Image: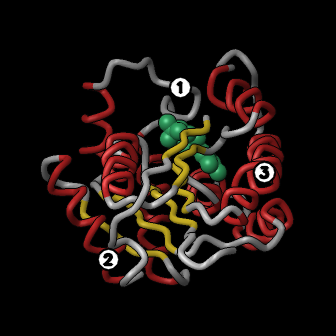
Amino acid sequence: MRDGSRFVVLEGGDGVGKSTQIALLSGWLGAVGLPHLTTREPGGTPVGEAIREIVLGRSDLDIGPETELFLILAARAAFVRDVVRPALAEGKTVVADRFSLSTLAYQGYGRELDLDHVREADDLARGGLRPDLCLVLDLPAEESRERQRRGVDEADRIEREGRDFRERVRRGYLELADTEPDVELVNARGTPEEVHERIRDRLLARFPGVFRGGGATDAQQVG
Ligand code: TMP
């Protein structure tokens, strides 16, 4: 990795406003002239997008928790090899919409798979690569559900899960933010601009120097 490139992940339950925040963050990184790439998981590569279609789009399939885990991790292996590592090697900052913490929160806490097994399998998929920082956007599960309902898109296979699942996922994120290294919680209440400011503050505090300055803009989006 060249100096200056960072691997930053935005995390959180469905409906917390991640996509809006990724767009605002990308605009800001462009304005400060930081070469970067925004991308999402599952997805980001052709095989990853095909897997995303199965995992989220195929509500007609009975996909068990272990099968779901391995589909997502299969997409992750391609994502790390074909997207994240090359971008970091070129000196770009990578901003990902979800990564391994989602797997711990959704497949570990949400689907109630053994957390140590999920961690081991995930470690294999990401080849040991770790984000420099994960920011978990946090909202009470019912508030994010309400935001999601107001959205235009139809609920996908995982978004259709009930309240208990959403509560387990949120509890998972809160516990992980407490115990995992390089994971910070961000209050997702308020206007998009207010939340964006909180995210910017975290990045500036965490990586002083990297997220300041001018220069040519080089923004790219994958997935
Ligand atoms: P999103 O891209 O709209 O946030 O949707 C991705 C969905 O996939 C979301 O419901 C969370 C789920 N997911 C998992 O269950 N495990 C994972 O490891 C990842 C990356 C996503």
Residue bearing mark 3:
73
C-alpha distance separating marks 1 and 2 = 35 Å
Q: Which residue does the image show at 76% across and 56% down from the upper left?
A: 80
Q: Is mark 1 within 8 Å of ligand 1?
A: yes
Measured along the vertical axis of the image, is residue 27 above or below residue 133? above
Dots 1 and 2: beta carbons under 8 Å? no
Classed neighbour count for the residue bearing mark 3: other residues with Cα under 10 Å, few (<14), some (14–19), many (≥20): many
Residue bearing mark 2:
204
Judged by depth in the image, the label closer to the viewer, 2 or 3, is 2
Query: Label 3 amino acid?
Result: Leu
Mark seen at residue 156? 1
Q: Secondary structure at mark 2?
A: helix
Q: Earlier in the sequence, mark 3 or mark 1?
A: 3
Query: Label 2 amino acid?
Result: Leu
Toward the viewer: 151 or 192? 192
C-alpha distance separating marks 3 and 1 = 19 Å
Measured along the vertical axis of the image, is residue 35 above or below residue 65? below
Q: Where's residue 23, x and y in %?
A: 36, 42
Q: Where's residue 69, x and y in %?
A: 76, 48
Q: Is mark 3 within 8 Å of ligand 1?
A: yes
From this viewpoint, is residue 164 visible? yes
Q: Where's residue 105, x and y in %?
A: 56, 59
Mark seen at residue 36? none
Q: Which residue does the image show at 70% across and 69% down from the upper left?
A: 115
Q: Is residue 51 left or right of residue 168?
A: right
Q: Quadrant of the N terminus?
A: bottom right
Judged by depth in the image, the label closer to the viewer, 1 or 2, is 2
